[in-house]
Image: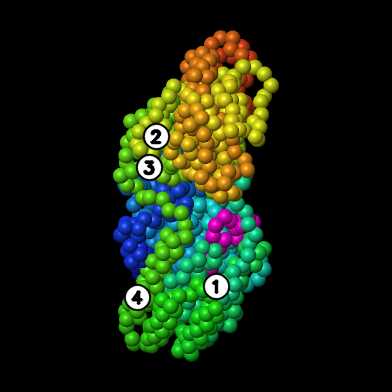
Amino acid sequence: MSTPHRSRRRTSLLGAVLAALTTAAAECAGDALARVFPYGHRHRSVNDLGNQFVPFHAHLWDLLHGRAGGGMLLNWQSGYGTSLLPDYGTYLSSPFALLVGLFPRGEIDLAVYVVTVLKTAAAGAATAWLLRTQRRGPWWAAGLLGASYALCGWSVIEASYNPMWLDGLIAFPLLCLTGEWALRGRRPVAGAAVVALCWTANFYTAYMATLGAALVLLVWVVLTRDGVRERLRVAGRAAVTTTSGAALSAPVLLPVFLSSKQAYPGWSKEFRPVPAADLLARLLPATYSFSSPALFVGTGTLLLAAALPFHRALPPRVRLWWAGLVVAVLLSLQWTPTHLAWHVFATPNGSPYRQTFVLAGIVVIAAWTALAAGPPRPAALAAGAGVLAAVALGAGPSGLATGWGYALFGAGAALAAAAWAAHGRRGRPAWPAAWALALVLVAQAAATTAYGHQGTLRGLDDYPSWGPAHTARARALAGAEGWPAYRTDPGRPALTGNDPLLLGGEGGAYYSSHTPDVFTRTMVALGAGWTSRGRNVQSLDNPVTDALFAVGARLRPDGTLTRADTLPLVTLRPPGPPPAYGEESPFANQELLLGARVYEGPVAPGVCRAGTEAFLWAPQYNATARLADGPAFRLNSTPPRNRAALQPMGASRGASSALLFDAPAPARWQLSCLDRARLDAAVAALRASAPVAVRVGASGIGATFRPGTEGTAVLAAPAIAGWTCDGRPAGARLGLVAVPLDGRTTTVDCSFRPPGLLPGIALAAVALAVVALRAARRRLRR
């Protein structure tokens, strides 16, 4: 390796290190300024971070340490048995996620935070390396521009609470790097490997990053290659690299895609672009809005990008193409057809501007293009400052702009202009400009981070970080563990939507983008409640469903455990036509699944017979209810977001235990009375016909019945796609996995494999062969 090349690699590495350190320092400073965990009393576990991502990372910790229920294919802990691979590919497939295994289990919140900071720093480092690969320029400037990208508003405000999105932040510079390799006809194997890594880590944001990288490559091709043939050759190399790399991720990608098609329908809404003033306001530091694009990039970077059209050291067509790309991508955020194209043709739930990081990356590349041609002259900097002044004026009517934001923007622009002007003077040392620009970036990014925390903590649901209550519940669940003889449920009220993953046990609660439609509908038919419009199914606190789903121990809010004799994971139902749930009564549906009458009611007057247990079903009631001589119970329903669960009201003493609503009674409600003696008899009858042996594995279950057994074997697991029994696709009975028995077969052997896994493996094998052929062809040419 030549000395100049070695020197350039060394300075590029210095730029990457500077970007990573600056990024980490600014993000941690902003968190500390806001006194947010781990630097203060405010916790970070808001919205899906506390409700989904931390529990899933806790489950990954259990997998890494051999303590999880199930394996990589089947998650026995959630939703009475769900597919894990789609959740893994959506939330946990980043290489950084494996780092949680190095932390104590009780420090899972800290582990996720450290992973978040490291991912953000890695994005800055990757961008700095890309910039130095693309064009020559000061290594320290590449480092600061890389950090500016990593600290964009989208990153520190939105993606910091959605750690898997940060893999897209890393993917954009890496995919641009593969485009640069395609441009030069280099490293086809490495390019495919990088694409596969990005698409496996998080396919959703990798898709957006791929679109952005394709636009960047388009500009590079137009500006550096002449002739249609040569341009098409570059495009062909890039297409093959991208396609083969994405295909290598198919063993994860296809199961994720198919699972999303089988999930319970989420919330959909029509896209509405934000007003222009709000769009411009989000370019300022210290702004927050959940439904507008977080466009902030450090003003040192913005000033360079704004000066680009006026930088005469660059040819006019270079200025036109890069400025045009920035404007085109900005406008694409606001136009419905392009908005849909960025988001895989579906407006996302929650934040509708998840592609914003791509714009930040393009702005940074444009800024580097301006700087690498030589620092802009004062006239160009003045024109760029005028553009930023126009942005500030245009943001005036917006309610999102803040006084602090304007102050930081104005001061930062002035200091950045002075720094870039000083850097442009020959004979002047570079370090004063570098320090000034680093100060501007860190101050603005830290302030934006802290301000974003205020908006997030004020406007989103929050969940407690791991503390003594978590430890106590986890210990109680571990002490009651009896899997696979019976399940242990973390109970209600829950700390999160995924308590079985976070705390332990094998409960019915489950919250994911992949919550199966069949599971939600089955549990709702039996009386379960939900949040997140049906994607977050809650545990159902009911003795009948506990018996049906083999829940032998249930944790109570006071830390005590209730135990009950229950059924095994496989039971037998008599021959007959397949039954179907009704829509009028969850009590009748429970009895249908159990095969016996155990309730008295529905009771119209609202009084249960003494000695029975009262249960209230009022799915659209949002207040408290009680028996006249008992405590009040809260039912939570805010349709369509929340659905109230069937609520145990306590033992009835007859007329003195009349049902009372503490608000106007809902239009639809039922009170039924459970007779425990009947339930015990029904459980005993099912036990008498149960299999003589049940075997449970990481991704399957088997049972042995007595010779001559006829009827239907029913697994206490939802009939999600992917189950096969005795070599055939499994059947279903009332939403559960079912296998017919004809009297000649004494064994049932069921296994689970996520749909799309085998086709994904086959597609990856083809892609691997293509990559190998390209490598061999390249070697022969050499």
The circle drawn on residue 555 is: 2
User: Please, what is the three-letter code of the amino acid marked with disc 2?
Assistant: Leu
Residue at the image point whose x is 64% and y is 31% from the top: 581
The residue that label 3 is drawn on is 61
Mark 1 vs mark 4: give the one in front.
Answer: 1
- Which residue is at the front of the view, 192 or 185? 192
Query: What segment carries the magenta color?
Result: 342-361
In the image, residue 73 lies at what x, y percent? 50, 36
Hey, which quadrant is residue 348 in on the image? Answer: bottom right
The residue that label 1 is drawn on is 278
The answer to which of marks 1 and 4 sits earlier in the sequence is: 1
Neighbour tally class for label 4: few under 14, some 14-19, many 20 plus, Cα within 10 Å: some
User: Please, what is the three-letter code of the amino acid marked with disc 3?
Assistant: Trp
In this orientation, does residue 150 appear? no
Q: CA distance from mark 2 to mark 4?
A: 52 Å
Mark 2 vs mark 3: give the one in front.
Answer: 2
SS at circle 4: helix
The answer to which of marks 2 and 4 sits earlier in the sequence is: 4
The residue that label 4 is drawn on is 439
Residue at the image point whose x is 57% and y is 61% from the top: 352
